[in-house]
Amino acid sequence: MKLFLYHTPELTPKDEIPDCAIAVDVLRATSTIATVLAAGGEAVQVFSDLEKLIEISEQWPAEKRLRAGERGGAKVTGFELGNSPLDCTPELVHGRRLFISTTNGTRALQRIQNSPSVLAAALINRAAIVEYLLEKQPQTVWIVGSGWEGSFALEDTVCAGAIAHSIIEKTHVSPDQLAGNDELIGAIALYTQWQDNLLGLFHHASHGKRLLRLECHEDLKYCSQTDILDVLPIQQEIGVL
Ligand code: 3SL
């Protein structure tokens, strides 16, 4: 198995498809997706376009759906939810389908949606992702960070490092044997340096700072936890996890 890290969807190679592709948006889309599925959500359907989301979700019974939308960190007017995983309680989401559109995370998922296997990873469900990779042993794995509007994000990179670090610990392969590119080696180094203070790292991240300005401190705390949810968000059909 070779792991390749791409810091943004735009940096993934054109005209190539890996055996397995993993979208990461720790702050906060993939953390929210993992939380909804762990809380008994029926499925999560992702959209980059808000109008399309409204059109498709309207075909669903109102009591069986929830609409979540975020732009610039804030909730989209008229939707039940923004993009805070803390709002996704079992009481609210159980048995309902979440229709979601966010600035960056949903774009990352859409970029990789034609891969034979598509996962959504965050720190909170890292162990389930690692377990899947070790069981299925895909040869080529892309980890695609969502970044922020085309730029690098520390929190997505450290999550890629956390995934790789766990595989190395469990299988005793060397970083060089596992890494498909230099970005992954850099991510392992970042995780090794910050693994005991991931919340502290998020305070240095530009999107972490943006969320703190929006008073989302509890979101940062929640998303900085590792391995707390045993859930594998895996694409069932295009755009649906
Ligand atoms: O960009 C995204 O996809 C979001 O996760 C950003 S936010 O954390 O909801 O602001």
Image (tube, rainbow, N blue to C red):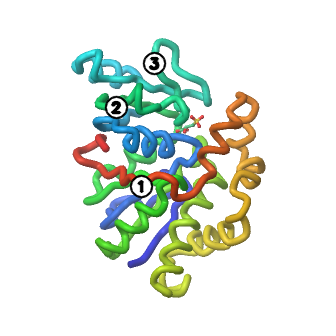
Q: Mark 3 or mark 1, which is nearer the start of the sequence?
A: 3
Can you give x and y, in whole percent of width and height, for residue 31 in the image? Answer: 51, 45
Disc number for residue 80? 3
Q: Real-space Cα distance between discs 2 and 3?
A: 15 Å
Q: Residues within 10 Å of mark 3 (few under 14, many from 20)?
A: few
Please identify the quadrant where the N terminus is shown: bottom left
Can you give x and y, in whole percent of width and height, for residue 165 in the image? Answer: 56, 73
Q: Which residue is mark 1?
A: 230
Q: Which residue is mark 2?
A: 94
Residue in view at x 70 percent, y 43 percent = 208
Locate residue 136: give its quadrant: bottom left
Q: Real-space Cα distance between discs 1 and 3?
A: 26 Å
Residue in view at x 34 percent, y 38 percent = 40
Q: Is residue 112 above or below residue 79?
A: below
Q: Are marks 2 and 3 in contact (CB under 8 Å)?
A: no
Q: Mark 3 or mark 2, which is nearer the start of the sequence?
A: 3
Q: Residues within 10 Å of mark 1 (few under 14, many from 20)?
A: some
Q: Real-space Cα distance between discs 1 and 2?
A: 16 Å
Q: Quadrant of ligand 1?
A: top right
Q: Amino acid at mark 3?
A: Glu
Q: Residue furthest front?
A: 91
Label 2's element? loop
Locate residue 112 relative to residue 87 in the image: left or right.
left
Residue 98 visible in the picture: yes
